[in-house]
């Protein structure tokens, strides 16, 4: 469907953004953004997505990127939407139960009546920028750390690198997330990004590294210089990747 119009939804911890793009990835209208409401059971998120769709031009298909472990459109785990008031607040048992094994792709398909692909948000982000050659790692820096790995353009099974421990009791999410950036300032936080990249490099041995997300452009030049070859990608890739995911082998 080269001329298909894609409704691309980027679900974040602080905001839900949506836009409709043509087959070339060009915007057909200005993006729409809504603050992420909490608590956020699945039906409330579905209603928010439907409301954003109503404010945009008609689409032929839908791409949804959301945080957490998503397999075949089903939520295995999502970190923020199970909490009472958003990131870093207490998880609620009833929300953990509601989101566990929730068929997000099926629910969006039923709500909007369109074909749907649901992936981890970093995977959608990466789909918008990868070259499709060799091993390419995409890291997104925002509320926490997102990641996606591509091998010759094929999306690899998702790994929640954000949950790996930097040191005892401290994960990459806690080490690099927005809360720590605000506490430390961009200079100290940028050094943390460099250390994290250095620690992940021997694990992945990538051919290309991409850094993006809402805080990707906050990494100081002095830290970037010490990272070696790296591409900083715009946060808009999270929406524009919504078109390209339909060209990936899994889609």
Image (spheres, rainbow, N blue to C red):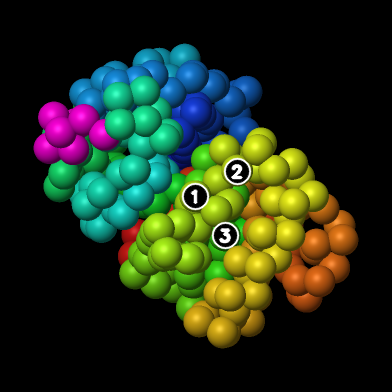
Q: Please determine whether, in this image, residue 214 is positioned above or below residue 47.
A: below
Spatial distance from mark 2 to mark 1, Cα to Cα?
7 Å
Q: Secondary structure at mark 2?
A: helix
The numbered mark, 3 or 1, whose residue comes first in the sequence reads 3
Say which residue appears at 26% left-offset and 49% top-offset.
77
Say which residue appears at 63% left-offset and 81% top-offset.
207
Region of the chain picked out in magenta, as a range: 91-97
Spatial distance from mark 2 to mark 3, Cα to Cα?
17 Å
Q: Main secondary structure of the magenta part?
A: helix
Q: Is residue 215 magenta?
A: no
Q: Is residue 232 left or right of residue 81?
A: right
Disc number placed over residue 180 in the picture, else none: 2
Using the image as rendered, state which of residue 27 and residue 133 is in the foreground: 133
Count the marks: 3
The numbered mark, 2 or 1, whose residue comes first in the sequence reads 1
The answer to whether residue 22 of the structure is visible from this angle is no
Q: Is residue 41 left or right of residue 193?
A: left
Quadrant in which residue 45 is drawn = top left
Mark nearest the camera among 2 and 3 is 2
Crowd band around label 1 with a 10 angstrom C-alpha radius: few (<14), some (14–19), many (20+): some
Find disc 1 in the rendering and name its residue: 174
Q: Is residue 92 magenta?
A: yes
The answer to whether residue 66 of the structure is visible from this angle is yes
- Counting from the top left corner in percent of width and height, residue 29 is at 60, 24
Say which residue appears at 49% left-offset and 28% top-offset.
14
Say which residue appears at 73% left-offset and 60% top-offset.
191
The reply to whether dot 2 and dot 1 touch (C-beta < 8 Å) is: yes
Crowd band around label 2 with a 10 angstrom C-alpha radius: few (<14), some (14–19), many (20+): some
Spatial distance from mark 3 to mark 1, Cα to Cα?
15 Å
Find disc 3 in the rendering and name its residue: 139
């Amino acid at each position: 469907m080269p001329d298909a119009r894609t409704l691309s939804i980027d679900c974040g911890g602080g905001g839900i953004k949506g836009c409709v793009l043509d087959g070339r990835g060009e915007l057909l209208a200005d993006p729409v953004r809504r603050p992420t409401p909490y608590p956020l059971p699945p039906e409330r998120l579905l209603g928010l997505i439907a409301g954003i769709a109503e404010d945009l031009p008609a689409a032929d298909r839908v791409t949804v990127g959301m945080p957490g472990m998503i397999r075949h459109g089903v939520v295995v785990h999502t970190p923020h939407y199970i909490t009472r008031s958003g990131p870093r607040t207490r998880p609620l048992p009833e929300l953990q139960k509601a989101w566990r094994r929730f068929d997000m792709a099926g629910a969006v398909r039923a709500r909007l009546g369109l074909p749907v692909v649901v992936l981890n948000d970093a995977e959608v982000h990466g789909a918008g920028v990868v070259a499709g050659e060799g091993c390419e790692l995409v890291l997104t820096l925002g509320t926490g750390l997102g990641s996606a790995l591509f091998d010759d353009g094929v999306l690899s099974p998702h790994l929640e690198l954000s949950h790996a421990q930097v040191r005892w009791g401290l994960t990459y999410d806690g080490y690099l997330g927005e809360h720590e950036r605000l506490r430390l300032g961009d200079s100290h936080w940028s050094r943390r990004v460099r250390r994290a990249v250095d620690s992940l490099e021997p694990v992945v041995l990538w051919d290309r590294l991409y850094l993006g997300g809402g805080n990707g452009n906050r990494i100081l030049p002095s830290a970037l210089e010490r990272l070696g070859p790296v591409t900083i990608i715009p946060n808009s890739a999270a929406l524009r990747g919504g078109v390209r995911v339909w060209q990936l082998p899994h889609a």
